[in-house]
Image (cartoon, helix red, strand yellow):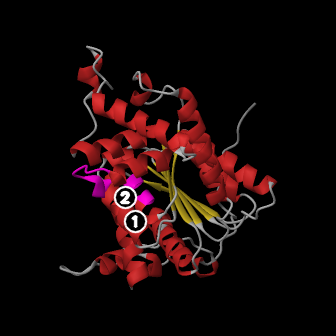
Amino acid sequence: MKIKPLSSKGIRTYSIRKRKSKVSVADLAKIPERGGTFRDFFDSLPDILGAKDFKDVVAAIVLARKKRKTIAIGMGAHVIKTGLSPLIIDLMERGVINSVSMNGAGIVHDFELAYSGSTSEDVDSELKSGAFGMAEETGCLINKAIKMGAKKGFGLGRSVGVMIEKSRYPYKRLSILAAGARLGIPVTVHVAIGTDIVHIHPQMDGAATGKASIKDFQLFAGVVSSLEGGVYINIGSAVIMPEVFLKAITLSRNLGYKVKNFTTVNMDFIQHYRPITNVVRRPTMGGGRGFRLTGHHEIMVPLLYAGIVEGIDG
């Protein structure tokens, strides 16, 4: 078959003035003045793509806080390892964050920071000799707290949080779990058995851990059932929290709670399938908005924190 070249003669054109365009001069970045405030920097960002999404997320959080709606975060342990606990705790104390949820590794790093002022061992070097995860205090004290808390009917987060809050640990002010216990804010922990270093210690009690963790799932589901008009932010959890969140959504809706018009956000340095699907897309299909903010936690979370504080104090 012989192909005949196409000529552009005779095409239909139109004036650019009549065309709908995605970018206008009003959307462009502004030049911030030297020595200006964070507000000046924030306002200088372009209203385009990721910067616009960032502004919209800040606006949604500020509005939800103004209307006294639920603002909840679910996170991976990397958020703690990258030094962001002080910002999370401050937002809890300001009444911005109403609930924090984390995977099992979160309690390890939260406890270690409070207890010794350090965390995050060198897995590559320790694994060779089988020393990885064998810190005595971490395995013993966390498992002891879970067992004691489970006997009292506490969830896993409260069990460890109360233990840290009542302790004389030198850095307990940096514990998200202790802050939750002190402020009466739910901090729930969602465990997958075998994924955390405390599970390889002899003090590990599977029954107590399971009992405390399901208690936390039920509490988390209660938080999710109140998300109408609020905001849920997933930070750095690629599997556990997105799966737990989806189950809490369907449980809430099945029981007749209206969880339709709310905002979801996934923040990570790589956008993975489950957070995109189970946090950003599926829960907001019938209403609300889902956002993806991509970047390193140690940069993006402080920026988000500063934007929120400017918004609620401004």
- Label 1 close to label 2 by CB (< 8 Å): yes
In the foreground, 149 or 184: 149
Q: Amino acid at mark 2?
A: Met
The C terminus: image quadrant: bottom left
Label 1: state its secondary structure. helix
- Residue at horizontal 69%, vertical 60%? 225
- Residue 154 falls left or right of residue 43: right
User: Residue 304, labelled with which disc?
Assistant: 1
Determine which residue is flagged by label 2.
300
Q: Toward which corner of the image does residue 263 lie, by quadrant? A: bottom right
Q: Which segment did they paint magenta?
A: 167-181
In the foreground, 51 or 145: 145
Horizontal and vertical percent position of residue 176 = 38, 55
- Residue at horizontal 48%, vertical 66%? 97
Residue 52 falls inside the magenta stretch: no
Label 2: state its secondary structure. helix
Residue 168 falls inside the magenta stretch: yes
Q: Check the image and name the residue furthest to the top.
A: 129
The answer to whether residue 84 is visible is no
